[in-house]
Image: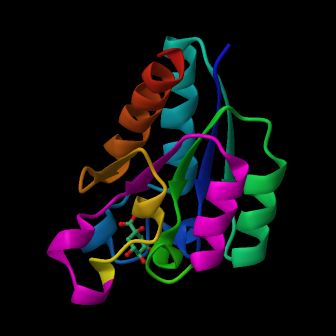
Amino acid sequence: MTHILILNGPNLNLLGTRQPETYGTVTLKDIEGMCAAEAGKLGATYEFEQSNHEGTLIDLIHATKAQGIILNAGAYTHTSIAIMDAITSANKPVLELHLSNIHQRERFRHHSYISKVAFAMICGLGASGYPLAMRAMHEHLAL
Ligand code: DQA
């Protein structure tokens, strides 16, 4: 059975109230519910985590027994060589995910360290990107 880690970085715990014009009004709890429903449809299991701390995100990447990781690293996407290295060391497929279209936003969001080590990236679809990412990961792991 496919087991997927959905990992969320800094400030994503504030979804629902944080810049709704950019990120929508869906909360992280709602998104977890969407992921649970998708896991049920796929016949997959999942872990859903969020941390505001770079080191904790790295520890979760090291420790997970998941076969694949869906990662919304938040602002660490644009800064964290350490998270990029953790993904390389974990040696498992990572799908990079963003609610917003990072390429339509400020210039500093156009560069992603995660993209260097992810097999795919979904951005700009809001919360709907999460179940889509799970389906894509499930299919990727079945290849
Ligand atoms: C984000 C995009 C990042 O640039 C930003 O720092 C976030 C959220 C997104 O999901 O659109 O925190 O990862």
Residue 53 seen in this snapshot: no
Picture layout, residue 139 above or below residue 76: above
Q: How many marks?
A: 0
The answer to whether residue 52 is left or right of residue 129 is: right
- State which quadrant residue 107 falls in: bottom left
**Above or below for 32 versus 100:** above
Image coordinates of residue 81 in percent, x first then y, are 58, 78
What segment is highlighted magenta in the picture?
81-108
Q: Is residue 22 visible in the rendered structure shown here? A: yes
Q: Is residue 37 magenta?
A: no
For this view, does 87 lie left or right of residue 124?
A: right
In terms of depth relative to the viewer, which is nearer, 50 or 77?
Answer: 77
- Residue 91 position, x and y percent, is 66, 45
The answer to whether residue 3 is above or below residue 108 is above
Residue at point 64% right, 67% down?
85
Determine the residue positioned at 57% across, 16% down. 40
| Residue at figure coordinates x 53%, y 54% from the top left | 71
Q: Colour scheme in the image?
A: rainbow
Q: Specify the quadrant that holds the N terminus.
A: top right
Q: Nearer the viewer, residue 105 or 41?
A: 105
Query: Is residue 92 within the magenta segment?
Result: yes
Q: From the top left corner, tell me how far across and down residue 137 is, in percent.
A: 47, 31
Ligand number 1: quarter of image: bottom left
List x then y, in percent, for residue 73. 53, 66
Q: Residue extending furthest left? A: 104
Q: Quadrant of residue 51?
A: bottom right
Q: Quadrant of residue 105?
A: bottom left
